[in-house]
Amino acid sequence: MARHEMPPTLIFHGDADTLVPLDQSQRFQVRAKELGCRVELIIHPGGSHGWLTMVWDVRQFADWFDENLRK
């Protein structure tokens, strides 16, 4: 649930996820933006609910956290 006091949020979502539909993350992002919150949604083409190469995305996760939440 999106709330006014949410911290910046990063979501990686595969567009082939059959467990959690992509539109769930997209709707969350839209609602959060309406509340003035920042949600970055990165869509992984062909990714299901997790993907084998996700370990290579860890650097991008870490860089985002350093830029947005380190303070």
Image (spheres, helix red, strand yellow):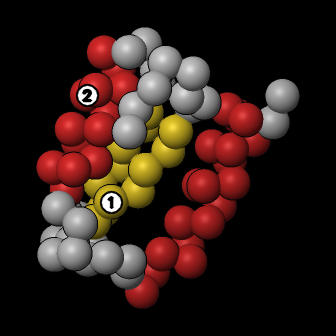
Which class describes the residues within 10 Å of circle 1: few (<14), some (14-19), or many (20+)? Answer: many
For marks 2 and 1, give the one nearer the viewer.
Answer: 2
Label 2 secondary element:
helix
Q: Residue at image x 69%, y 54%?
A: 62
Which class describes the residues within 10 Å of circle 2: few (<14), some (14-19), or many (20+)? Answer: some
Q: Residue at image x 23%, y 42%?
A: 26
Say whether disc 2 or disc 1 marks the residue closer to the N-terminus.
1
Disc on res. 49:
none
Check disc 2 and report the residue beneath it: 30
Image quarter for residue 44?
bottom left
Check disc 1 and report the residue beneath it: 13
Camera-side residue: 10 or 43?
10
Rendered location of residue 33, percent (x, y): 35, 20
Q: Residue at image x 55%, y 28%?
A: 6
Q: Give amino acid for label 2.
A: Val
Image quarter for residue 8?
top right
Q: Is residue 10 visible?
A: yes
Q: As drawn, is 21 to the left or to the right of 12?
A: left
Residue 58 vertical placement versus 51 (above, below): above
Rendered location of residue 11, percent (x, y): 43, 50
- In the rendered image, the residue lying farthest to the bottom is 52
Residue 66 vertical placement versus 49 (above, below): above
Residue 51 vertical placement versus 67 (above, below): below
Q: Residue at image x 81%, y 36%?
A: 70
Q: Quadrant of the C terminus?
A: top right
